[in-house]
Image (tube, grey):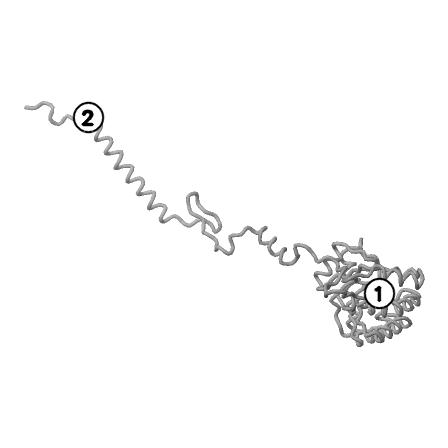
Amino acid sequence: MDTTRGTASPESAGLSRRLLLAVGGAVLLGGCAVTDSVRPSSPAGRSRPGTPRPVRPVADRRPAPARRHARHREREPAAVEQPMRFIQDGHKAIALTIDDGPSPVYTPQVLSLLHRYEITASFSMIGVNVAAYPGMARAVADAGHLIVNHTQHHHNMAFMWPAEVADEMDLATDAIHRATGRVPDMFRAPYGAWSPTVLQRCWRTGMTPLDWSVDPRDWARPGVTAIIRNIMENTRTGSIILEHDGGGNRSQTVAALSVVLPRLLDAGYHFRTP
């Protein structure tokens, strides 16, 4: 009789233990899988470790700050338009600008000269003067001249707060519109005092900033001869000439224009509006 039958060898015993452990592990894993399949879902917005997060739509995958910057670029230009100091309208094209009116005394005299020489000019008007003399403003518009916003009170806006700048420009636009039916699409800063705030306001309101390249300083009343000399010596193709019909006694300006206008025409210049 074989005395070893029924007695497991050490090798057999080890193999049996390994099989039992493997089977037990499989059963245990199966139980976990079943438990997970019936476990309640996590609260909204929270993911269990190892659970893939839901993928947002492609259109919404850009970070919020980037979306804000994109909207900001839509509102603000990369660089605002700089003031126009010359016109580009061909050889010997020039522009005449008349500031600080309208005036019941000097604007009619300037209009008469422009009519005589068939010249179209730009009138930079101050809102309070337009409100005081709306009929004069309408006469300028009806004669076919360009009307430019020159603020409500002719203050230096270089260091004004944005709200103050907006008021000065918007009130003048309203006054011009009430008097003439026109909404100005150009703006001239008093004293040529431009600032980023003023230029941004021009962009926001759709007005082109207008400067000048020839200043005979007629506002200082240097004398008729000095005004004439300055204009004739400095005018070139593309020049924008600055003159005034308001802000004081402008009899020297009117007298100088009566000489300058025919001389410029004889020299081959032709007048355009910016």
Quadrant in which residue 35 is drawn: top left
**Closer to us: 135 or 121:** 121
Residue drawn 36% across and 49% down?
38
Quadrant in which residue 25 is drawn: top left
Q: Earlier in the sequence, mark 1 or mark 2?
A: 2
Residue to which mark 1 is pinned:
99
Mark 2: which amino acid?
Glu
**Residue 167 appearing in the image:** no
- Kind of element beneath mark 1: strand
Residue drawn 74% across and 70% down?
183
Residue to which mark 2 is pinned:
11
**Closer to us: 61 or 38:** 61
Residue drawn 14% across and 25% down?
7
Dividing the image into 4 quarters, which one contains the N terminus?
top left
Dividing the image into 4 quarters, which one contains the C terminus?
bottom right
- Kind of element beneath mark 2: helix
Residue 189, relative to residue 140: is it above or below?
above
Which label lies toward us, 1 or 2? 1
Residue 104 is situated, as x and y percent measured from the top left of the image, at 89, 72
Residue 115 numbered mark, or none: none
Residue 189, relative to residue 33: is it above or below?
below
Mark 1: which amino acid?
Asp
